Image: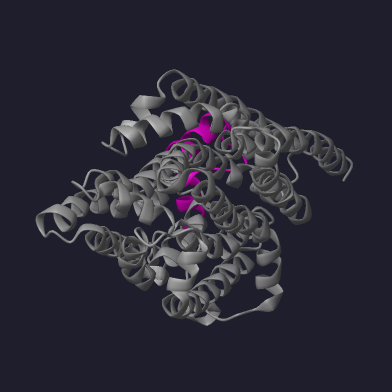
């Protein structure tokens, strides 16, 4: 009884008014993603300001993104697949199943972390060359990655398990997980980079320390007395009956993130061919601006996910529709705002990451092309993540593959053969793929969501 009271105080997913409930849950998750954005870009901001070598160091960091993204993708495979399953189980009144899912996912995350650490330490140099590192930028990439991969277990713990805190309606606690690490990272970066004079190595050390603190916070909470879902030793084992459905559902966010690595490689190789290190450096900044849109939208969707998943399990179609509607409205307002800023003040955004005038001009020019239809991210992200919350693994996986694998990567390779300005063509592939993917995702969601609502209404 006491556990139920604590859970209700956190958030009554089945009865609180949907609009205020979404705001209540989404504000912390959006804040968490914004703070997490600092985690991802603060290193680039500081490194880009290093005198003399800042431009090369920033480009070197850019070619490490595929490895960093892959680590996050594996965390999403388990965490973002397992936490909606836990939410659905809680909505159906199967609390023990939800806790067993948590235990299984934790064991899987830690096992994967060990394997990935060994692999990346052994093969990082050939991988970085494959990812577009030049002779000048490879040393900086190696300096950063050598240290960063040692914190793989901390990254996967913090990212993978934090969703299980949000899944129980405690998004404020989940926000603290990211806030603690990110604030610490912002504080430690200038100390290690400039005060201790460690440059790129200092940025990596600061990041690993910050991630370790976040991971310890997550584990401490999930084993404490204030959590509704407790990480128990008895459930800490690989149960394929729970793990496989989680992986099936997590396949969509995994593909979305892991293909980002392949996408980064494709972009870097093409940009190195047509524009050299300067174009690759600009792409590093463009990726950061794109994250300024994607991560808050992801936070909004994470706030809506427990509402949608819980009420799907509880068979409440009215609340499901309200959840999606409010999510989309807020997402559109935000996405259009950032898109307008990118179109009207591209130099302002570029100066956040660089002081080299040539790099700033190249980035500002590319930003207007790359982000030409950036506002459609509101539709793509809202409906894509809603499919995940509904347990629609196959559709989610297809949509994740469609934008990057089916559309964007082929266009990066094909469009330069159709345009005289080949560098323009590489950047132009992004808005073409974004528009087509958003149209497909919106159409499929409207059709499938109506089918789900009709089925629930007749049960």
The residue positioned farthest toward the right in the image shown? 458
Q: Confirm whether residue 323 shows in the render.
A: yes
Q: Quadrant of residue 449?
A: top right
Looking at the image, residue 137 lies above or below residue 291:
below
Q: Nearer the viewer, residue 439 or 94?
A: 439
Question: Is residue 362 left or right of 303 when viewed as pictured?
Answer: left
* Residue 439 in magenta stretch: no
Q: Is residue 25 magenta?
A: yes
Give left or right: position of 52 versus 366.
Answer: left
Q: Is residue 451 left or right of residue 436?
A: right
Labels in figure, total: 0
Image color mode: one colour
Quadrant in which residue 196 is drawn: bottom left
Q: Out of 417 and 86, give the one closest to the viewer.
A: 417
Residue at 55% across, 78% down: 235
Which residue is at a point 55% across and 33% down the rendered structure image? Answer: 370
Asked whether 371 or 54 is in front, the reply is 54
Instruction: Please identify the residue farthest to the left as the structure is shown.
Output: 195
- Residue found 44% across the figure and 80% down from its top: 122
Residue 63 placement (x, y as % from top left)? 44, 57
Kindly tell me whether residue 1 is visible in this rendering: no
User: Residue 416 or 338: which is nearer the viewer?
Assistant: 416
Q: Position of residue 256 (x, y in %)?
A: 62, 52
Q: Which residues are magenta?
A: 1-27
The percent position of residue 107, horizontal first and vertical second, equals 52, 77
Q: Position of residue 161 (x, y in %)?
A: 48, 62
């Amino acid at each position: 009884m006491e556990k139920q009271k604590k859970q209700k105080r956190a958030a009554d997913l089945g009865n609180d008014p949907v609009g205020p409930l979404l705001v209540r849950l989404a504000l912390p998750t959006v804040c968490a993603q914004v703070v997490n954005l600092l985690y991802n870009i603060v290193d680039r901001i500081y490194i880009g300001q290093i005198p003399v070598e800042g431009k090369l160091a920033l480009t070197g960091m850019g070619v490490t993104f595929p490895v960093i993204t892959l680590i996050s993708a594996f965390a999403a495979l388990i965490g973002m697949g397992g936490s909606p399953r836990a939410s659905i189980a809680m909505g159906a009144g199967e609390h023990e199943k939800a806790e067993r899912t948590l235990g299984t996912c934790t064991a899987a995350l830690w096992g994967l972390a060990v394997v990935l650490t060994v692999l990346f330490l052994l093969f990082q140099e050939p991988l970085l060359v494959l990812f577009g590192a030049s002779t000048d930028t490879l040393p900086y990439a190696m300096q950063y990655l050598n240290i960063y991969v040692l914190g793989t277990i901390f990254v996967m713990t913090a990212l993978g398990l934090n969703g299980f805190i949000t899944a129980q309606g405690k998004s404020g606690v989940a926000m603290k997980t990211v806030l603690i690490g990110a604030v610490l990272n912002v504080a430690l970066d200038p100390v290690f980079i400039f005060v201790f004079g460690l440059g790129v190595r200092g940025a990596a050390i600061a990041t690993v320390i910050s991630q370790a603190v976040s991971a310890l916070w997550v584990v401490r909470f999930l084993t404490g007395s204030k959590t509704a879902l407790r990480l128990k030793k008895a459930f800490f084992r690989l149960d394929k009956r729970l793990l496989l459905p989680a992986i099936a559902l997590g396949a969509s966010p995994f593909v979305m993130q892991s293909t980002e690595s392949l996408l980064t490689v494709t972009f870097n190789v093409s940009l190195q061919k047509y524009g050299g290190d300067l174009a690759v450096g600009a792409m590093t900044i463009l990726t950061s601006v794109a994250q300024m849109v994607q991560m808050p939208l992801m936070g909004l969707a994470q706030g809506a996910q427990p509402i949608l998943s819980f009420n799907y399990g509880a068979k409440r179609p009215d609340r499901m529709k309200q959840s999606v509607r409010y999510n989309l409205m807020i997402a559109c307002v935000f996405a259009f705002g950032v898109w307008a800023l990118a179109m009207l003040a591209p130099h302002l955004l570029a100066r956040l990451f660089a002081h080299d005038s040539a790099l700033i001009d190249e980035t500002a020019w590319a930003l207007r092309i790359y982000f030409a239809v950036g506002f459609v991210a509101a539709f793509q992200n809202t409906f894509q993540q809603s499919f995940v919350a509904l347990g629609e693994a196959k559709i989610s996986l297809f949509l994740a593959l469609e934008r990057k694998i089916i559309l964007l990567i082929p266009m990066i390779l094909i469009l330069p053969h159709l345009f005289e300005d080949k560098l323009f063509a590489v950047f132009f592939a992004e808005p073409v793929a974004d528009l087509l993917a958003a149209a497909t995702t919106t159409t499929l969601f409207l059709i499938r969501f109506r089918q789900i609502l009709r089925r629930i209404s007749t049960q």
